[in-house]
Amino acid sequence: MAERLETPLTVNGLELSNRLYRAPLLECAGNGSDAVETLVAHLEPAAASGVGLVCQGATIVTETGGCAAPNMTRVHDPAFVGELERLTGAVHDHGSAIVMQLEHGGLRSMETWHAGYRSAHPGLEQLAVSPLPGLLRALDAVGFLDYDVHVLSTDEVYDLAADFGRAAGRAVEAGYDGIHVAGANMGIVQQFLSPFYNRRTDEFGGSLAARTRFLELLHDEIRERAGDVPLLTKVPAETAAPSFVRRHLTLADGVWIARRLETVGYDAVVPVQGSVFWDMSLVRGAYPSAAWTSDRYRDGYAEAFGGRLRARVVSVLNWLQSRQYPYEPGWNEAFCRRVRREVSIPVFCEGGVRSREQMERLLRSGACDAVGMGRPFYAEPRLPARLLGTDGDVAAVCASCNNCAVPQVTGAPGVCRTPSVLRRRGEFERDGAYE
């Protein structure tokens, strides 16, 4: 029988009430006194409205460095993580499950691109898998980026993996149902996997099998410290890499990685396509003109990018990329379909999914076992209430305009800022659609 959105799904003994999940997003909660309340405010509405699984967005496993954007939450402190029982309890009270996504940005971290952060932390180096690729050295030479890299020794690779394991152990003690490794989006895990970044000569570099070794080590550390909880990870394919980048992960590489991770013991995979760079291949959609022209964030952009002129240059590059990567419904579908033919563990699909009809088609056709949405939850925190329990073609109000994402470089929270979308959400609220 073809699976439907409301069909339960079991992942390593964890039963999800349905196949809809809230994909990881930047909650921008930080670690301050109101961090837990901020996370509850972001994540509980999805559970309260019926989503099967909540994925808390990328949380950093180290005490310093590694944040790809301002106000990301760190989980190195046992006392802070213990307070997150309030979040996991709130999610569980609604019958949903919750996993924590663990991350380290590596070369993507703020100490690379955020001018104000670099100025405030002049001694902070970027953790690197290998010496910089030539293209990044050139960007450093002209001052567009600022690199001061520390290439991880073999022993330090093991230490970093242990940081992931310790963070996972704390999360499970705080009530999280599983762990989600941030294996894509240009973070440190993808940098280990990618031949563009990884030119190591030890056990973690060389062949694709050797470059996958770090994810295998993460599995071992997490299992040792967190037990046999559901463990999932994103699996990248760098199909959007520019043509001049010859060394990158192909779709075939991504399928191989997924097969290998099933053998190692991962319980689910999330295939995603992107680039070797942190660009709009991650958030395909329109140029966020309203966000760039807002007086509210102008000073923040100048601080982040090193002045108003440089911020304007970044804005122009953003416009060019929006034309290269327009919104494409379900842009990871083909990759997910190829992976699902090769593995027996659940395959999760996200990226450009916006409607109930699209979700049902993905499930019926065998492209995946669960379907996730990310940015639409910025616009409609209680979106599952409209999507679940209906046979109609219900669509999210999200316009894929990216006005939610760009202000996050200034430390602004992830919320919808597009008036037409917010008006539509207001109409649904008045009609009781989210009750």
Image: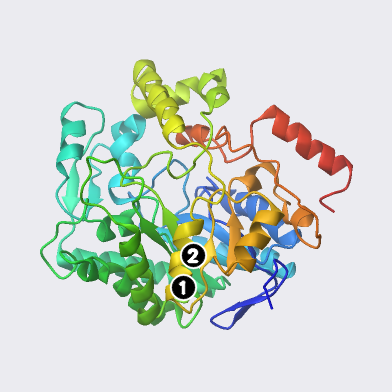
> Where is 423 relative to 230, above or below?
above
Q: Where's residue 40, x and y in %?
A: 65, 55
Q: Residues within 10 Å of mark 1 (few under 14, many from 20)?
A: few
What's the mark number on residue 341?
Answer: 1
| Residue on which disc 2 sits | 337
Q: Secondary structure at mark 2?
A: helix
Query: Do residues under tags 2 and 1 come within 8 Å of each other at their CB atoms?
Result: yes
Percent across and percent down for residue 206 are 15, 64
Q: Quadrant of the C terminus?
A: bottom right
Numbered mark located on residue 152 in the image: none
Query: Which residue is at the front of the view, 386 or 28?
Result: 386
Q: Residue at x 57, y 50 (%)?
A: 35
| Closer to us: 305 or 351 | 351
Q: Is residue 133 left or right of residue 36?
A: left
State the CA–CA distance, disc 2 to disc 1: 6 Å
Question: How are the colours assigned in the image?
Answer: rainbow
Quadrant of image for the N terminus: bottom right
Does residue 199 show up?
yes
SS at circle 1? helix
Q: Position of residue 21 (x, y in %)?
A: 62, 61
